[in-house]
Image (tube, rainbow, N blue to C red):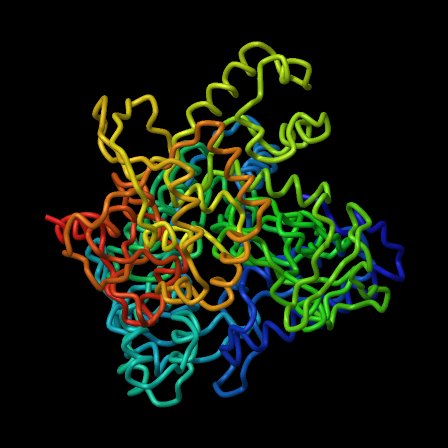
Amino acid sequence: MFRMWQKQKMNKTEAKQRIEKLKEWLKKWNYEYFVLNKNDVSEAARDKIKKELIELEERFPEFITPDSPTQRVGSVLSGKFAKIKHLRPKQSLMDCFSDEELEDWEERNLKLVPGEKLDYITEYKIDGLNLSLIYEKGKLHRAITRGDGVYGEDVTHSVRTIPSVPLELRKVGGASLNDYPVIEVSGEVYMSIKSFKELNKREGQVFANPRNAAAGTVRQLDPKVSADRKLDMFFYSIYFDKNSVLPYPQSQKETLKLLQDLGLRVNTNFVHHSSLASVRKAMSETEKKRDGLPYHIDGLVVKVNDFRHQNLLGSTAKAPRWAIAFKFPAEQSTSRVLDIEVQVGRTGALTPVAILEPTLVAGSTVSRATLHNEDEIDRKDVRIGDTVVIQKAGDIIPEVVEVLKDLRSGKEKKFHMPKKCPVCGGEIERPEGEVVSRCLNKNCFAVHQQQLEHFVSRKAFDIDGLGEKVVEQLIEHKLIEDAADLFSLQASDLMHLDLFKDKRTENLLEAIEKSKIIALPRFIFAMGIRHVGEETAELLADSLDLKTRTITLKKTQKKNQLSLFAGESAEEKAEVAEIPALQKALLKLTVDGLNGIEGVGEKVAQSIYDWIQDEKNQSYLDKFDRAGIKLLVPPRHKSSKLKGLTFVITGTLPTLSRDQAKELIKQNGGKASSSVSKQTDYLLAGSEPGSKYETAEKLGVKIIDESKFLSMLS
């Protein structure tokens, strides 16, 4: 990952200013998060800012101050409770977010213990509040928050109400509790997802998430409130005088065993690993399980197991070298806007795009993010040089969420939309009442290329081998004027293009030939009619009454776009329509008739009607007819078992593709929607469901799995 000071080549004055800004921002966030229990900014965004500060301080150590957030652990004390000094200073863990960073951590450690073989323990990183408990003569004496790492808050009165916290330890090895030394144990207090939902239902939306709820509950002055809110706790470390009646553990594995023997609750999902490869595999498996757990976790804590190795590795001033927090990929992060470019889409729409310093978001490196339109840039006040929070919208498209204006240096530049098309230099128009500017040149190269890329995309004709570079070459060499020309390409046309040889040419021509039989909704979507997306194309296709004929399709013809076919039979009967039948049906449509289709609004109806009436588009359809395109017409409803029901699909289903599930819903009289709302009847959820799952839970939408869905059809 690029480091900011490498990218920007800061001088000392600029570095000092940037460091001060970052410290002020982190202190503000830490106070709101740890003391006020506010979660307005994601932990991932805070982590990214802190990482930038660490890198700058490493580069310019003369600007490190004792009050820097990187030089202390935990949070500022709230002042409500008595300050208690920890028996041992508390340290925080280093974070890593990728396999590469984890491997770097091991490599650094192996240099400190040459010739040694390290084994590891992984434990769930519970998203809660770290506490230390002091037991004297086996009895709970005091519970202390982490605080600033040296002093914490006395919250014993609340912790005593937690059922999973023993007020008295169990006897180990026949030792008397009176002979027990002073024991300090550490762990994580958390609130289960179930208890969190019950709390918010009972008391209103008091807290944003279970972690904040746990922190706020521990700090309640009235222990009755703490008891009612049902907290839990897991323990993971212990410290006491080694010259005591208790056997001192020699590894983290033995520590967890001793904690259990003493009656302290341990998360039993810990795993012993003999290699880092095993740790990586555990991380992958844990990420799949996380949504099914009764509590929130944000990764794994990886610890060198053997205490002899831990002692050899030691610690830095802030963190142990022998442990690291291996966190799930961040859904939000921060980055610097290096520039703002304008893209031209298939309808001529001009979209500003932020060019970012590369950063890791949700498991992939992001270097570009959409800014949507000029009004959005003005509303958020995005400037070149700004530090911004970014996230993946719907877990797919990166977007700028907000600008961290407090981090501005004064050198940021305002952005202005171009007066001419940045690709062809043509005139630009922004229609009244719209937020998008458009290039008016119908021969604009960018518009032409985007239209063709849309045509061959996965949800349209889905032609293998026709990527962006190939489409660009076909246009540049004037081999095609529009998408219909693709079906008249010959081997001799392709052989002189870059990287095209016999086999690649043969494969592409075969893919084009296979795509000549296409489902009607996909064909309509491929036409690129303004405002007509995948769902609207399906609604329009369902409303058309076309003359059809029956054909037999072979298994080799069942490409991805033929999603209405499930099963693996060698042949299946299908209903197809010719292009002239589609033209005839389309020309009968009126704006009022289109507007009467459920789900098609006035604006969309007018756009469809205008496209149909354009003579150029009629000629365009004629070319597809001459090319031999056949339209697969989806069968009408097989039953009314799902009549009146609206479904949304999320995640990966065990046996059905999303397209197959949608087709089954429609064939049985239901409606498949792309977004969850109060009108949604069922969320059909598979593995890794994403944000739609949480939205459904909040709205009280019934959530079902594939087996339940199929049982509704049987």
Q: Is 206 in front, or is 214?
A: 206
Q: Quick one: which residue is furthest to the top in this view?
A: 502
Residue at the image point whose x is 44% and y is 61% from the top: 590
Drawn side of residue 239 relative to residue 710, left or right: right
Name the spot of residue 167 as percent of width and height, x first. 26, 73
Name the spot of residue 227 as percent of width and height, x first. 27, 81
In the rendered image, is residue 130 in sight?
Answer: no
Q: Is residue 553 above or below residue 36?
A: above
Q: Quick one: which residue is furthest to the left in this view?
A: 714
Q: How many marks?
A: 0
Drawn side of residue 380 relative to residue 164, left or right: right
Name the spot of residue 202 as percent of width and height, x first. 28, 84
**Which of the 4 image quadrants contains residue 245?**
bottom left
The quadrant in which the N terminus is found is top right
Q: Is 625 in front, or is 264?
A: 625
Drawn side of residue 43 relative to residue 339, left or right: left
Q: Is residue 171 above or below residue 214?
A: above
**Which of the 4 image quadrants contains residue 520?**
top left
Q: Is residue 21 above or below residue 343?
A: below
**Which of the 4 image quadrants contains residue 21?**
bottom right
Q: Is residue 25 above or below residue 259?
A: below
